Image (cartoon, grey):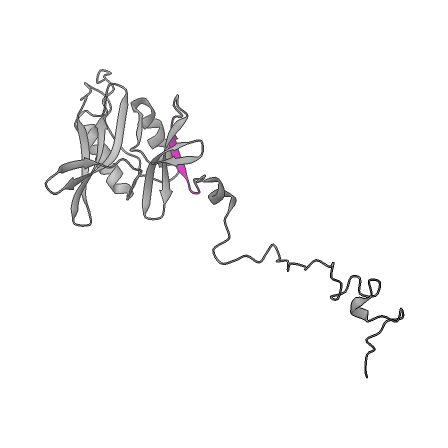
Amino acid sequence: MRVSQFCRHNRFVAECPICSKGTVLDPNRKAERPTRSAAVRRPGARRSAQAASGVRVSRGEFASAGPYEDGREVRLEKVPGGLRLAIWQAGQLIKDAPVLALEDLPRMLQSASEQGLLEPPDIPMQGDPAIGAHGASPGRTGELQDELRVERLDEFRLRIARWIMRPNRGWELQEAPVLLPADRFLRALGSAGERGVLASGDPVE
């Protein structure tokens, strides 16, 4: 069947402003852009609200110390591979070595024990404080020696961080969250207790 090229107005259909209006022959018709379903995305284009905002959220059980004046808190949380001790501020993980108040340590360890993160530690915290001293749990990072140290910074603060022995450079502090098995934390805390690092200055009863 042949289709007439003339419209009822006796013009070529392509030239008739009435009959060609809204069709592919309409010179004023804008080309339609194909739409994509909101559920169909380019590979790698999917980003969660968490990734877009840059905020990381603690997903597992955790015990905390703080918050302190700057809004930071120290969290001991269960993650794949062991426990992570890290500073958090405004919902974000801070890449600094964890520092907490000595008086907050017992409460954080008790909470961690109640949640099954750590075995209940028996750590002496009385007697004369050893300011500047540290207890350590030795291990290895690849081919390098490392230590998890619990350090007494001053009368009120502790730093719990990893140190790595660099060839020809000596021990180097790692300004980063600590991710290690639970037993490394317990050994470091036990060593610190034996050395007076965790002593509050209260007399031994």
Which one is nearer the viewer's eye here, 200 or 148? Answer: 148
Farthest-out residue, left: 168
The residue under the point 32% across, 45% down is 82
In the depicted structure, whether residue 202 falls above or below residue 148? above
Q: Position of residue 100 (x, y in %)?
A: 31, 27
Q: Position of residue 198 (x, y in %)?
A: 23, 25
Q: Where's the C terminus, which quadrant? A: top left
Residue interval drawn in magenta = 59-66
User: In the image shown, does 49 or 154 lie closer to the viewer?
Assistant: 49
Residue at left 52%, top 44%?
49
Decide which of 92, 132 is in the foreground and name it.
92
Q: Quadrant of the N terminus?
A: bottom right
> In the drawing, does residue 127 fall left or right of residue 62?
left
The verdict on residue 62 being magenta is yes
Instruction: Report the number of discs.
Output: 0
Question: Where does residue 99 sit, x and y in percent of width and height?
Answer: 30, 28
Q: Residue at x 64, y 58 (%)?
A: 35
Tell me the quarter of the picture where residue 58 sits: top left
Residue 113 lies within the magenta run: no
Using the rendered view, name the quadrant where residue 199 is placed.
Answer: top left
Residue lying at the far bottom in this picture: please name it.
Answer: 1
Relative to residue 29, is residue 195 depicted above or below?
above
> Does residue 129 appear left or right of residue 71 in this picture?
left
